[in-house]
Amino acid sequence: MVVEKYLNENFGEVKAKHSSEEVLQKWRNLCFLVKNPKRRFRFTANLSKRHEAAAMRNTNRTNQEKLRIAVLVSKAAVQFTLGAAGQPSDYKVPEEVKAAGFQICGDELGSLVEHHDLKKLNFHGGVVGIAEKLSTSTNNGLTTDSDSDLNHRQEIYGINKFTESEGRSFLVFVWEALQDMTLMILGVCAFVSLIVGITMEGWPKGAHDGLGIVSSILLVVFVTATSDYRQSLQFKDLDKEKQKIAIQVTRNGYRQKMSIYDLLPGDIVHLAIGDQVPADGLFISGFSVLIDESSLTGESEPVMVSAENPFLLSGTKVQDGSCKMMVTTVGMRTQWGKLMATLSEGGDDETPLQVKLNGVATIIGKIGLFFAVVTFAVLVQGLLNRKWQEGSHWRWSGDEALEMLEYFAVAVTIVVVAVPEGLPLAVTLSLAFAMKKMMNDKALVRHLAACETMGSATSICSDKTGTLTTNHMTVVKSCICFNVKEVSKPNDASSLCFDLPDSALKLLLQSIFNNTGGEVVVNKDGKSEILGTPTDTALLEFGLSLGGDFQSERQASKLVKVEPFNSVKKKMGVVLALPGGGFRAHCKGASEIILATCDKVINVNGEIVPLDISSINLLTDTINQFASEALRTLCLAYMELENGFSSDKPIPVSGYTCIGIVGIKDPVRPGVKESVAVCRSAGITVRMVTGDNINTAKAIARECGILTDGIAIEGPDFREKSQEELLELIPKIQVMARSSPLDKHTLVKHLRTSFGEVVAVTGDGTNDAPALHEADIGLAMGIAGTEVAKESADVIILDDNFSTIVTVAKWGRSVYVNIQKFVQFQLTVNVVALIVNFSSACLTGTAPLTAVQLLWVNMIMDTLGALALATEPPNNDLMKRSPVGRKGNFISNVMWRNILGQSVYQFLVIWLLQTKGEAIFLLEGPDSDLILNTLIFNTFVFCQVFNEISSREMEEINVFKGILNNYVFVVVIGCTALFQIIIVEFLGTFANTSPLTLPQWFLSIVFGFLGMPVAAALKMIPV
């Protein structure tokens, strides 16, 4: 189609993600006849604000370079600084800070961390000295006896919230709605009409036409403002949800989860890989901490943080390692706070549908302007011809001036109706409605475009753990010292303890309690609580069931080095300094990877023996047996470091002794199999991409219904394939096991580029960020996901459930279809209103629909139409259709069939009434023209009411199915009919209408209703 080609060429370059600023600016420049820029472009990116944010980042980068130089100089000068004993400082503690019981103010702390000022830090006594001045402990955190203690601290140091732009009031939206250029022109027409009318006919008769237009304008403005205001409130609620981040904090001596907004200087925060640093602070202790500062400075090179460089900046991300941090500066005192204030004003990118509909509005606007000009010219020509024939072309009466003004008002109103300003805004309305409802369904949409893109998804690449499974893990089988045992019941653990040699049990417990990212802590109720990932939690529970004591094991030896688990290495390692001297390394991870690092094993007697072929086969068979039972398998190993160890060296990668293997049960979530079947029927291919053992992955995939007639492949094999082999292999892949984040990224990239698929990808780890970024829709896990993954995602699945992903797809399809319905409805009204007024002006010299009537029609098709059709909830039938995919036309052939067919019917009805109406209704007398025009107006409106009902389904004949489930639709239709009765029967003086008799009402409604069987007949025509 010509329209679709034009849209793709001029408005089709904007993508759902990562569109360049040039592309975003290009379509703005192409928009023609924008009636109200403030409203039309309200939900598009503010490019000027983005330039400001980029400039601020560049400044930060420059400052960081200066800071690095300053740090080097500072380090060189530390000895001199410390040697200058008694050197006075010009810092004085403000009196209000002293009075509150602190010895350092917020500005001093902010300056110290932001400028990486080691000299100032050393002057204040280092991290311990700062802790004392903040009245906190690096071990127990803040001690607060009452809320007043926290309030005092907040008054001195502020709260950890950024300044947000104030929410706009309802009156602001009223003012913006009034900025509509065409409404302003109509307002001027109304004012002139009032002056001329009152001068000619006096008050109140002469004011009726002018007041009618003013009332209509005000009604349009207030309905528009109310709709926009409600949308803004919905977006505000969603923005609050996006910003909810919880983090592990030690306060009052115990670990607890706390919102980042409750953090105060002096709090001790526990950071792990993938976390976002929630405030400026100082490093206390930790291992291998790499910080990604690119979000703050634009610098891609990660920064190592340690006791020598202890400064942590708010908004940066933990790329590797884990640490404890003491909060020093919060909120708007941080550099991140100042940057966020600017970034928040930049707004989200506009969505592809918004841009396409701006293109549609532009096309129709040009056509509408042409029709408006021609209509005005034809009407004026008719008036001039009449005056010429009468010989009064040099004499003008007030009535003739008012007639000319009415013609101008009709022409302007044709532009009002013709330019569908509501089209792009209907996208926003539908997306806002869907996002709010999806929030209730446990899906938080971070980017508007994801909502509509998900409706076109053809492929979902899903993680296994926590998405297809429950993520509630327990150790149910073990193979320690070649002793395979069930350990799912409480008595099983004590039986295992009895069977194991003491030396092996001691090594096992030392490995479990030291080589972990989790902790066993005492909560505020005085009870033990296990913190950590589900895998760590399962192992710690297993260790406790064997009679182990977490705290005593941790205190018995000292951690020298920690290499945290990540999805590339698929293992975690630690080195311990033993109490009797010497060092020992422990590692755990993917069974076959850890087993490959071992050359010894502990036998049934607790003796360390070489790992021969028969032992390897026995352990491999055990791993495969556990995996075939859908268990996750982990191997634990250790190594004596007889030559000593230095913390700056990597942990050895070979020469380990195998302690044993554990099998962890992670059951499939209820409803996943059904959800996968729904995806299959919807034409969406589901693939499992996991880091687990291939046998575990296959067992779970079969249980979920994912692995059917396709293939399962391991990441290392996938990596070795050539380009040609990949193109043949990828369509068949249903399971990829032992995959790395790079494998996932490669798979997604090929699906998108080589096969033209619209791909949704799930991810929870820091290393999943590239795949989430590459995918059309990135889905991060809300429970298991790291902050880095969530930042890279478009949608956050709050319950980590695959069924929720299917719900997101259903809502995405609903949004897409709803907007298509609205576009079909609005274009029909546009076409008919234009043709009726234009043809009537050309053939009869009058316009049957007046300015006031056209404004009412505009409101029916714009704001009220969007409310009714764009907020239709999804139904299960949506998931029985094929996906639109990447190349589907938005304005489909089905829509063109419905638009043109319904337009022809409505035009024929209106034309019949114009030419034969007086005969059909037996109209006579001086009011016959007014009654006929009222009948035309009434019939036209009821045609739209019944067409709105027909538009609920574009292909199905039964349009009443589920109509009562959408109360908004029922209310809009009811209110439209009610107001139409009021306008016709009671507001005739202002709206140029005359009260109708019951037979006239009946026939008007029947003409409108007949559009429904016409619509049903049209749906039977194949396209």
Image (spheres, rainbow, N blue to C red):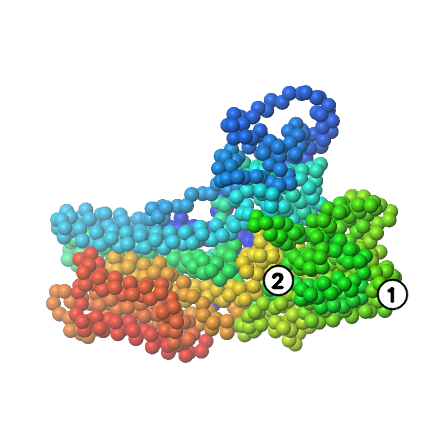
Label 1 sits on a secondary structure element that is loop
Residue type at the position of mark 2: His
Query: Is residue 413 shown left or right of residue 26?
Result: left
Can residue 426 be seen? Answer: yes
User: In front: 364, or 948?
Assistant: 948
User: From this viewpoint, is residue 692 visible?
Assistant: no
Q: Report which residue position mark 1 lands on.
A: 612
Decide if residue 706 is on the left or right side of residue 659: left
Q: Earlier in the sequence, mark 1 or mark 2?
A: 2
Q: Which quarter of the rendered picture does the C terminus lie within?
A: bottom left
Residue 472's disc is 2
Q: Are there few (<14), some (14-19), or many (20+) residues within 10 Å of tag 1?
A: few
Q: Residue sitting at 53 percent across and 52 percent down? A: 23
Q: Left or right? Give the position of 629 relative to 795.
A: right
From this view, report whether residue 153 is shown above or below residue 353: above
**Front position in the image: 609 or 10:** 609
Please determine whether, in this image, residue 1005 is positioned above or below residue 198: below
Residue type for callout 1? Asp
Q: In this orientation, which residue lies closer to the viewer: 778 or 243? A: 243
Seen at 22% across and 54% down, the residue is 212
Image marks 1 and 2: residues in contact by CB distance under 8 Å: no
Which of the 4 image quarters holds residue 57? top right
Label 2 CA crowd tier, 10 Å (few <14, some 14–19, many 20+):
some
Counting labels gives 2
Whole-number angstrom distance, CA of label 1 to CA of label 2: 36 Å
Residue found 74% across the figure and 68% down from its top: 485
Spot occupied by residue 388 in the image (x, y as percentages of width and height): 18, 56
The residue positioned 73% from the left and 62% from the top of the image is 634
Whole-percent x and y of residue 557? Answer: 76, 47
In percent of width and height, residue 433 lies at: 43, 59
Depth check, front residue: 443 or 756: 443
